[in-house]
Image (tube, rainbow, N blue to C red):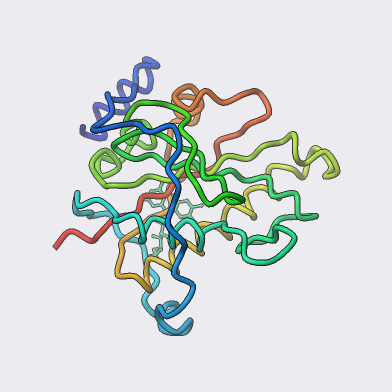
């Protein structure tokens, strides 16, 4: 769908998900992430960039697994994560929009939990490529987990935490030969509706990931 059509539908509150492609499983247990190999950090940094042309080819489960672990997985005993958060509030949830449904990444069990049995990639942004790229991530702050942070600081702290996660995804993508772009030009209320978010939850950013279109 073109950006203009999406903008028009967004204004009318009509930017809606599509039916799922395939089987929307309630839980998808991810394979163990590959924590070895990959590009050396300085080479990944040298390759990091935004890309906006994606192939439709799906991400194989091992790639999705390593990508989500790199993004915000548990990386040590005690539940520490691959990205920082103020007072370790871990207030960012990573939602995973796939053709076969929208899922919440459960880092503790390294699994995806179904939140909407629809293909809501189209709803994750105004840019046309988000509809057909195989994966759109949505970063949502849960303000209920930030009670110890002064109210006026919560959004900026959560945005910083989400930014760290997006950079983890950029670096994994650079290492794995994937294309990605962080996106703030999104219809936050359409996304919140489609994901069924509550009052404490705030949609911050989205990020598309896929194989580069050749
Ligand atoms: C907070 C933030 C929001 C962004 N929003 C969008 C967006 O909505 N759509 C988009 O295509 N790129 C977006 N970008 C990506 C920037 O356009 C991109 O990072 C910039 O052009 C520099 O290119 P590079 O990432 O390849 O170095 C955003 C970047 C940041 C940091």
Percent coordinates x, y for residue 168 in the rendering? 51, 64
Question: Ligand 1 is in which quadrant of the figure?
Answer: bottom left
Percent coordinates x, y for residue 22 in the rendering? 24, 33
Judge from the rendering whether residue 40 lies leftward or rightward of residue 108; answer left or right.
left
Nearest the eye: 181 or 64: 64
> Who's the residue at 26% across and 35% down the image?
3
Q: In which quarter of the image is the C terminus?
A: bottom left
Q: Is residue 176 above or below residue 200?
A: below
Judge from the rendering whether residue 63 lies leftward or rightward of residue 71; answer left or right.
left
Percent coordinates x, y for residue 35 in the rendering? 49, 72
Nearest the eye: 107 or 19: 107
> Who's the residue at 25% across and 50% down the image?
58
> Who's the residue at 34% across and 22% down the image?
15
Nearest the eye: 189 or 35: 35
Q: Quadrant of the N terminus?
A: top left
> Who's the residue at 28% across and 54% down the image?
52
Q: Is residue 97 above or below residue 116?
A: below
Percent coordinates x, y for residue 41 in the rendering? 48, 81
């Amino acid at each position: 769908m073109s950006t203009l059509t999406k903008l028009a539908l967004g204004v009318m509150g009509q930017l809606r998900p599509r039916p799922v492609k395939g089987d929307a499983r309630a839980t998808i247990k991810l394979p163990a992430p590959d924590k070895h190999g990959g590009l050396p950090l300085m080479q990944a940094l040298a390759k990091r960039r935004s890309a906006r042309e994606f192939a439709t080819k799906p991400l194989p489960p091992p790639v999705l697994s390593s990508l989500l672990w790199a993004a915000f997985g548990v990386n040590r005993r005690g539940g520490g994560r691959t990205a920082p958060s103020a007072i370790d509030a871990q207030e960012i949830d990573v939602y995973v929009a796939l053709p076969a449904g929208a899922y919440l990444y459960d880092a503790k069990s390294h699994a995806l939990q179904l939140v909407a049995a629809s293909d809501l990639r189209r709803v994750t942004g105004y840019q046309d490529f988000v509809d057909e790229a195989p994966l759109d991530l949505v970063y949502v702050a849960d303000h209920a987990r930030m009670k110890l942070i002064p109210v006026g600081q919560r959004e900026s702290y959560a945005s910083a935490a989400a930014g760290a996660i997006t950079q983890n995804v950029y670096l994994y993508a650079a290492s794995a030969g994937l294309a990605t772009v962080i996106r703030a030009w999104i219809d936050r209320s359409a996304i919140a509706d489609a994901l069924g978010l509550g009052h404490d939850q705030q949609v911050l950013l989205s990020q598309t990931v896929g194989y580069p279109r050749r």
